[in-house]
Amino acid sequence: MGPKNQDYSEHPKFHVALDCIIFGFEQGELKLLIHKRRIEPFKGHWSLFGGFLKDKESLTDAANRILRELTGLEKIYMEEIQTYGEIKRDPAARVISVAYYALIPSHRYSDEHSKQYGATWVSLKDLPALIMDHDTMVEKGLMRLRRRASSQPIGFELLPREFTIPQLQTLYEAIYQSELDKRNFRKKILSKDVLIKLEEKDKIHSRKGAFLYRFDKRKYKHLVDGGYNFTI
Amino acid sequence: MGPKNQDYSEHPKFHVALDCIIFGFEQGELKLLIHKRRIEPFKGHWSLFGGFLKDKESLTDAANRILRELTGLEKIYMEEIQTYGEIKRDPAARVISVAYYALIPSHRYSDEHSKQYGATWVSLKDLPALIMDHDTMVEKGLMRLRRRASSQPIGFELLPREFTIPQLQTLYEAIYQSELDKRNFRKKILSKDVLIKLEEKDKIHSRKGAFLYRFDKRKYKHLVDGGYNFTI
DNA sequence: GGGAGAAAGTGTTACTATTACACTTAAGGT
DNA sequence: ACCTTAAGTGTAATAGTAACACTTTCTCCC
């Protein structure tokens, strides 16, 4: 038994990159964090945020590093989507790219940290064309978000800690791109019994004010561990 | 505009491998195609089939090549599952591995071609421990199979062209690891209207014999294109 | 050739989940 | 005080899912 590094040396090596599909939710709209690329090829064109894998980090570490460098945030919800390996996907060189998607709750995000990278939130409705296969990645990320939203209360990753039912409904409507019935939505979401109703109301978004809720992580974990399927 | 190869040359390169989670269905059981590894490290231990990515092939090409070399088959259903990039996952060297899952209908498989590689079908129930993170890959592949089976008639990828309803039910029971009601299953699957009933019966599996059916690919495609969700 | 055995095939009812739908309440601004 | 705006609430119809037992068909064996 003597595993040696040169065992595999006959096989070629590749650049490995990561691209982050970063979703946010603001002003009732689903948004994507992108920037204008600063290096060739495609310098000046809209692009996802990405970076190269380093020698001494795992893929998830790299994805977290890229997000941390960009936003200053830790413990962001991330998930791998797919790996892209077409030969000519990057005209400059052969690069294998692993796409991750991330959900950032707007209250944790600050422009301060990210502006040095030219980070811009763009509404999904008026998303410009992105470089290389990044459009495909976004499409796939959106599909994943939809699936996740209907099987886990992932929406909570996109809202502030305290939120109202109408806000939550708007989020789901933005994700599914379709209108939901107020009564049915409220009934269903409350029947899950994972929301804690607070005393206070949010009076910013309406005169009457809507009661604030908080997500009961403990109860939710309990449900999921018991094989529960959280369908909206 | 002058994309050059050396743009990225400061970044490290990595070995990229592929591992195939190959599912089959025989004798009413879900099986996995594995072998005893012939190289160090972990020589002689059970392992998924895999191989290294080559310079002039895409990831999907590589996955198809590996499967073709192993089984002699083309046009096998394959799908990427996840990419594994922990630093120490392979003790011999840093290797990024992309896991694919594949479904092989038993009638297309022949031992002849695969025996040179020591390929063995093992029932999922008595699966031995696999090397490195291959157990995790199988677990994830199985989850994917379950999800796919409940949203697409993927089961058809695992059966011969002509099959009986009881056979199809057994397959679903193997995938879900739970018993289904005969009448409800038949009702539901036939209500999809994607099965063509044939004149002949299969008399191998019972005295009475069960009618053979064939999958109507045209109708199915029509449904899926129309956004239909094929739930069992 | 008659009977036993084994799996295929078939409908109905109860229950649960989903959808559709309209008015009242609360509060701030004029 | 009244107007405006969004929050909040219940019920009935419908569709989908789950539970359940007996009959049919054929082969093999005696």
Image: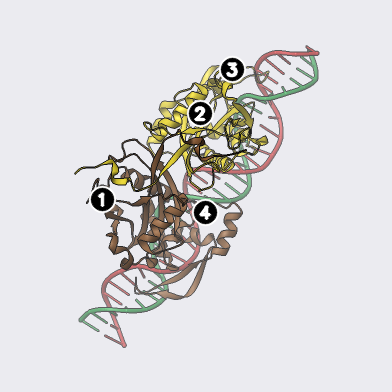
Chain colours: A yellow, B brown, C red, D green
Secondary structure at numbered mark 4: loop
What is the quadrant of residue A48 in the picture? top right
Relative depth, front residue between A29 and B34:
B34
What is the quadrant of residue A24 in the picture? top right
- Tell which tag, 2 or 4, sits nearer the viewer: 2
Q: Which residue is mark 1?
A: B39
Report the label total.
Answer: 4
Q: Which residue is mark 2?
A: A157
Q: Which of the two labelled residues, at mark 1 and mark 4, occupies the earlier sequence position?
A: 1
Q: Mark 4, chain letter?
A: B
Q: Is residue B149 visible?
A: no
Q: Is residue D26 positioned above or below D20 on the image?
A: below
Q: Is residue B176 positioned above or below A111 on the image?
A: below
Secondary structure at numbered mark 1: loop
- Tell which tag, 3 or 1, sits nearer the viewer: 1
Left or right of A104? Residue B166 is left
What separation in Å lies between label 4 and label 3 (alpha carbons)? Answer: 42 Å
Q: Which of the two labelled residues, at mark 2 and mark 3, occupies the earlier sequence position?
A: 2
What separation in Å lies between label 3 and label 1 (alpha carbons)? Answer: 65 Å
Which amino acid is tagged 3? Lys
What separation in Å lies between label 2 and label 3 (alpha carbons)? Answer: 21 Å
Q: Which residue is mark 4?
A: B230
In the rendered structure, find residue A201 and report the number of the disc placed on it: 3
